[in-house]
């Protein structure tokens, strides 16, 4: 079975590895022409040789370059996936560069990518936007304030687009994955892949990037009048919700109380 609506082209950002590369493979298998966007030209060329996609090397945080490269393209399916965890730290311990990097990529570039592609979809009265947020867009995480807030912005963008695009025939789907085994934490956790594996992935059944891609394709295949507006994709062994009471250990709490008196 191939994609049901008459979509011919797709553009995927953050396509050089991880979830984005898996989505490119899945969309190519559906018979779509796919532009794969990321900074690493070499990885994109390898993906192009493997899948027949078009490599489009681009730093999506360079808004002028983004407009020039993707503005002229007629994109039917847009997957806004490029994102990063630049640091795992509370805001007061985070450096200026890491803060800006996450907001520039996860928020500003995501918004600009949609802004540049959407007018063509509206003119053609057809298209499907996929915005990759995170389960953490909807739940607080210790030491992840900037990342979770950036993903909450993406989630709210998706909800607002649904309102603004009603009647245009354009579908909007927020994909909110839980833990997927990729290199997303590699830089923030010191660049040691074995250490990251041991800390996050070993002994735990994470999602694989191709499973997220499979969910996206299922949403794409639905009849045009059906929109899966938000999909949480989590490992069976991972749960979210409830209430977590953050509290200080006894001695620390007493120390803080006495210093406040
Ligand atoms: N892995 C998870 O557990 C998880 C969970 C929830 C949500 N997500 C979200 O899923 C998306 C994909 O994450 P992933 O796990 O696949 O991460 P990843 O393996 O680190 O891949 C990130 C991709 O983004 C690209 N990228 C980074 N900066 C870029 C820039 N300035 N311009 C263009 N492309 C850029 C990278 O390629 P280059 O370095 O070549 O540019 C790479 O292809 C992200 O939005 C992430 O927040 C991931």
Image: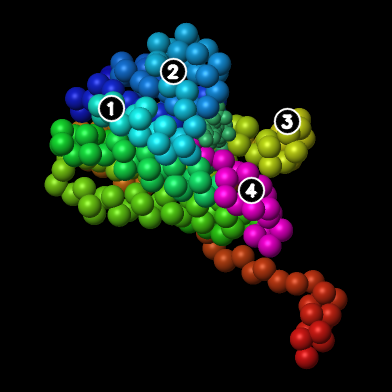
Q: Nearer the viewer, mark 1 or mark 2?
A: 1
* Residue labelled with disc 1: 72
* Residue 82 within the segment the image draws in magenta: yes
Give the CA separation, mark 3 to mark 2: 26 Å
Range of magenta residues: 79-101
Question: Is the CB–ligand 1 distance for label 4 below 8 Å?
Answer: no
Give the CA separation, mark 1 to mark 3: 38 Å
Sort mark 4 into few (<14), some (14-19) or many (20+) by Cα contacts within 10 Å. Answer: few
* Residue labelled with disc 4: 97
* Residue labelled with disc 2: 55
* Residue labelled with disc 3: 193
Q: Is residue 165 left or right of residue 133?
A: left
Q: Nearer the viewer, mark 1 or mark 3?
A: 1
Reply above or below: 220 against 158: above
Sort mark 3 into few (<14), some (14-19) or many (20+) by Cα contacts within 10 Å. Answer: some
Give the CA separation, mark 2 to mark 4: 28 Å
Sort mark 1 into few (<14), some (14-19) or many (20+) by Cα contacts within 10 Å. Answer: few
Give the CA separation, mark 1 to mark 2: 16 Å
């Amino acid at each position: 079975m191939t994609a049901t609506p008459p979509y011919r082209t797709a553009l995927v950002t953050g396509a050089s590895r991880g979830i984005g590369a898996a989505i490119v493979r899945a969309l190519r298998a559906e018979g779509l022409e796919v532009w794969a966007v990321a900074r690493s030209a070499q990885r994109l060329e390898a993906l192009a040789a493997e899948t027949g996609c078009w490599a489009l090397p681009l730093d999506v945080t360079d808004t002028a370059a983004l407009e020039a490269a993707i503005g002229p393209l007629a994109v039917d399916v847009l997957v806004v996936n490029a994102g990063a965890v630049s640091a795992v730290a509370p805001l007061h311990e985070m450096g200026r560069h890491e803060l800006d990097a996450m907001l520039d990529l996860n928020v500003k570039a995501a918004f600009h990518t949609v802004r540049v592609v959407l007018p063509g979809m509206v003119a053609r009265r057809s298209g499907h936007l996929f915005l990759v947020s995170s389960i953490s867009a909807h739940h607080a995480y210790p030491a992840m304030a900037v990342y979770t807030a950036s993903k909450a912005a993406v989630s709210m963008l998706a909800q607002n687009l649904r309102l603004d695009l009603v009647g245009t025939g354009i579908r909007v789907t927020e994909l909110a994955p839980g833990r997927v085994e990729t290199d997303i934490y590699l830089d923030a956790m010191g660049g040691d892949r074995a250490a990251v594996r041991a800390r996050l992935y070993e002994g735990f059944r994470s999602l694989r990037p191709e499973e997220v891609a499979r969910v996206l394709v299922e949403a794409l295949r639905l009849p045009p009048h059906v929109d899966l507006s938000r999909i949480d994709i989590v490992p069976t062994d991972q749960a979210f919700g409830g209430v977590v009471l953050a509290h200080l250990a006894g001695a620390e709490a007493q120390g803080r109380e006495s210093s406040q008196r």
